[in-house]
Image (cartoon, rainbow, N blue to C red):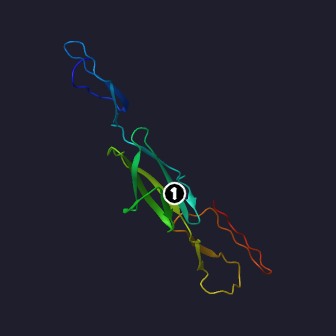
């Protein structure tokens, strides 16, 4: 088209070629410029599975931006901020992890949330009754078993000696 203004409205890498012609037909040199318009925020994925882990582990974030490129990635674990694409999870608990990336044009994606689940503690078991062995008659032995993070899958028992012991497994 003719004129002195070119409008670029779509997100993409654009090549703009222009020249001028005067009133007597003289044609000026052809010029080329490259213009990039990026109105699209980047996207970031996480390799967090949402499953419980029993040892320290790392969440890897993968940001991408097809036009201007990723400038940085921010995250927080339970409200404590950080920056980068690897997040070390090394304390037991159900941790809220939020993250987002910003591209080189300043476009920020909405925050994403995943949950990092780490349980390094063993279940706790304590005898509730009877309060004072030895046992002289058939007695129900009651235990209290707890796990503060991931929960219990199974409780089991065994006995040594001439007694017969019945144990209940719970799943």
Q: Is residue 18 left or right of residue 168?
A: left
User: Disc 1 on helix, strand or loop?
Assistant: strand
Q: Position of residue 164 (x, y in %)?
A: 77, 74
Measured as percent of width and height from the top left, residue 16 is found at: 33, 27
142 left or right of 47? right
Quadrant holding the C terminus: bottom right
Residue at point 57%, 61% (across, down): 53
Determine whether 142 is above or below 38 in the image: below
At x 48%, y 65%, the residue is 93
Q: Residue at x 29, y 29 (%)?
A: 9
Residue under label 1: 59
Q: Is residue 115 left or right of residue 108?
A: right
Label 1 Cα crowd, 10 Å radius (few <14 / some 14-19 / many 20+): some
Percent position of residue 102, x then y:
36, 48
State which quarter of the image contains the N terminus: top left
User: Image point 55% across, 62% down: which residue?
Assistant: 57
């Amino acid at each position: 088209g003719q004129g002195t203004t070119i409008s670029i409205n779509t997100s993409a890498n654009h090549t703009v070629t222009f020249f001028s012609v005067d009133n007597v037909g003289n044609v000026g040199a052809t010029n080329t410029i490259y213009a990039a318009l990026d109105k699209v925020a980047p996207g970031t994925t996480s390799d967090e599975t949402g499953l419980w882990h029993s040892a320290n582990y790392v969440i890897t974030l993968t940001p991408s931006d097809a036009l201007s490129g990723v400038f940085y990635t921010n995250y927080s674990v339970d409200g404590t901020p950080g920056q980068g694409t690897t997040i070390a999870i090394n304390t037991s608990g159900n941790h809220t992890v939020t993250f987002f990336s910003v591209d080189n044009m300043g476009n920020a994606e909405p925050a994403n949330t995943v949950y990092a689940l780490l349980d390094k503690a063993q279940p706790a078991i304590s005898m509730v009754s009877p309060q004072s062995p030895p046992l002289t008659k058939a007695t129900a032995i009651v235990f209290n078993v707890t796990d503060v993070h991931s929960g219990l899958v199974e409780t089991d028992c065994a006995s040594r000696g001439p007694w017969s012991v019945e144990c209940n497994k719970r799943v």
